[in-house]
Structure formats: C-alpha cells, structure tokens
Image: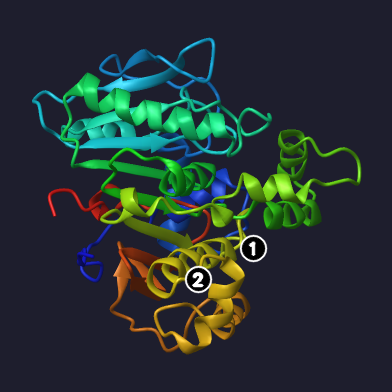
Amino acid sequence: MTNHNIKTMKYPVLSLAVAALLWGGAVSLPCQAQTAVKHAAQTSQWDDTSAARWSADFTVVDIPSKVDSRPQKAYLYQATEPGRPLIVSLHTWSGDYRQADPLAAEAKARNYNYIHPDFQGANTRPEAMGSERVVKNLQEAIEYAVKATGADAKEVHVIGVSGGGMATLLAYMNVTCPVKSFSAWAPISDLEAWYWESKARGNKYAGHIEQATGSVGENFDAAEARRRSPLYGVIPRKQRRTSQLFIYEGVHDGYTGSVPVTHAINMYNRVVGDWKYGLAQSEAANRQAFVHADLVSEDETIRLLTLRCEPTADPTLKLGDRQIWLQREAANTRLVIFEGTHEMLPCALDLIPIGE
C-alpha cells in the first residue's frame, strides 16, 4: 500500500470544531479551534439532514434497480473530460442522497466524477441499515456512475463517514464490481455492539436498530443485527484482492462522539486477520493480536480507551495537522487513530490513492 506522506500534510483545525458542533460532543478545543467554531457552523455540516443547496452542476439521476419497483435516486457530477476518477460518497446514518456533502464541491474542483446515492435512505427501516437492498443499491450506483460519466473503471473510490463509513465497509465486504479503494471514517462495524452502546447512552440509534432488525420490546434480535454488520460479513476475496481499505478514527470518538474507537480497531483486525492469517472471525483475530505485531492487541486498545492518546507516539507523525496516536498497515489495509473525534478531516480526498 502506498504511503501518502501523512507526516507532512498541513490543514486547518476546522474539522474538530465542526465535529463539536454537529455531533454534540463536549470537545476541549485549542484557541485556534475555538475561534473556528463560529465559522464552522456556516461552512460545513457533515450530518445536516435538512434540504441541501446543491449546485446546478450536480444533477439528480434515477438509477434502475433490480431490488425495488422504483429507481434509486442520486446526485451525479460528470467530469469535463473522459477517463477521470469516480468518487462514490456515501451519506451518513440519518441522511439520504439529498444530504449536504462537503466532498461534492471538492470533487468538482478536482474534476473528478462524483455520485451521492440514496441506498435506501436513513437507517431507520428494515429496508435500510445494512440490508441486502442496500448492498445491491451500492453496486448499482457504482456501475451506473462509471457508465454514465465515462469514468476510469480502474479509479473508483468509495468514501463515507459515520453511517457512511459503515456503508463503505459494507461495500468492501459485499460489492463485486471493481473498486480501487474504500475510505471509512469513524465507521460503525458491529450493529449488535453499537445497539448496546447506544442504549446505555440513551440516544436515538438504539431505537433505529430495533426498528430495522424487527426487535420487539426486550427481545433484541442480535443475530439480525450481526447479519447486517460489516464485521461479520464474508470478504469477496477475488474482487477485493487488489483493493485498498483505509479506516480512520478519532481517538475521542465514543466519548465526544457516538461510535467508540473499538469499531475501527475490530474491523481492521478482522480484515487483516482474514487476509494474512486465515482468521475469518473478529474474535479469533483479536485473540491472536498479541502475537502478530501488525494487529492491534487488547492491551493497546485498552490503553487507547483509557489514556485517549499514546505518550510514546512519534510526535512528527501527522494526519493533516492532527497527531497520529496509532497506525497499523497490512494486507492492503490501513488503520489510523488520530487526535480527533467523530469526524472526517479536510484532507480526506488527498488521502485517496488516485493515480497510484
């Protein structure tokens, strides 16, 4: 996997401020970020599910679907020349294709093709939240966009944050069309675990999971939650053989955000454990992590959860302008735990391996 020169890239401190506003976290911000908070509310809203103002350059398309009686909606941008990369940007947990997406304008500025599909909308119904329909919608959207825009089929890149990060992992574990890279930011990987985590916090996501899994009263359908979770899927090895998976997570998520850092770590261990050590189950990979240095051990995970930093980390190792506390890489898969919360950083598109 290519090194994306993570040490040297410099970006503003805006994302932490945005996350503090949008995800309800009580983040302790440095002075520069505190100043940015007021501006952040006006410039970028990652999980704003109200009606977005899309540029006229982005058109609403109807994608024929084999799993629905009606087509799937999406916003599409076509680059001004053929053979350009395709960015498949996936909406968050509560959003749909109409949701504001800061990556849209950036993709256009770089003259990348872009699609923002609906894939069953918000994760509140059985038809959504990791269902078979979602997976088929994702594949249909990718195939449609490649054909409609004349994109380079070897430069297809899927990206998402939070619920969009979960959808990115679902795509990695399920779609069979060619995809060069998958970038999952602050992803949910295990709906069973997230149900109990959300229930303990008293937030709305536990109710959403109950609705989608058909759980009634105290009878939570854990098996159905697992069936819809990326962590328990089966990697399509032939199709993913050359694909790259990037998992990014802020170390404070779960404290100041809604998804504990363990979701990212467990997914990384599960994928690398499968590819490199033949360990197809997350639990098996985690148990073996203490003997394989390219996996993240239970002791390291507990240390991160307790300290929310790694005092021995190389201070020059950065993701944008953020300190990297833990980084692992193996089997075309990279995990980066950085100083941050439930967010996607401004350097997200720069980290995608386009042309490499």
Q: Position of residue 54 (x, y in %)?
A: 37, 20
Left-right relation of 255 to 167 = right
Q: In this view, does 46 lie above or below 267?
A: above
The disc label shown at residue 279, or none: 2
| Residue 50 location, quadrant | top right
Q: Which residue lies furthest to the right in this view?
A: 218
Distance CA(mark 2)–CA(mark 1): 30 Å
Q: In which quarter of the image is residue 232?
A: bottom right
Q: Is residue 346 visible?
A: no
Q: Which amino acid does label 2 sit on?
A: Leu
Image label count: 2
Q: Residue 223: image x %, image y %?
A: 73, 49
Q: Which amino acid does label 1 sit on?
A: Tyr
Nearer to the camera, 267 or 208? 267
Give me the residue at 56% from left, 34% from top. 132
Is 47 or 267 nearer to us in this picture? 267
What number is the disc on residue 68?
none
Which residue: 44% across, 68% down? 337
The x and y percentages for residue 95 are: 55, 30
Q: In this view, does 149 lie to the left or right of 23?
A: left
Task: Tell me if mark 2 has few (under 14), some (14-19) or many (20+) residues whose alpha carbon lies within 10 angstroms of its own.
Answer: some
Residue shown at the point (62%, 34%) measured from the top left: 123
| Circle nearer the viewer, 2 or 1 | 2
Task: State the quadrant of the C terminus.
Answer: bottom left
Going from N to C along the chain, the mark reached first, 2 or 1, is 1
Residues 257 and 209: in front is 209
Q: Which mark is residue 255?
A: 1
From the viewer's perspective, is 261 left or right of 348?
right
Quarter placement of the N terminus: bottom left
Q: Pick whichever, 301 or 342, lies toward us.
A: 301
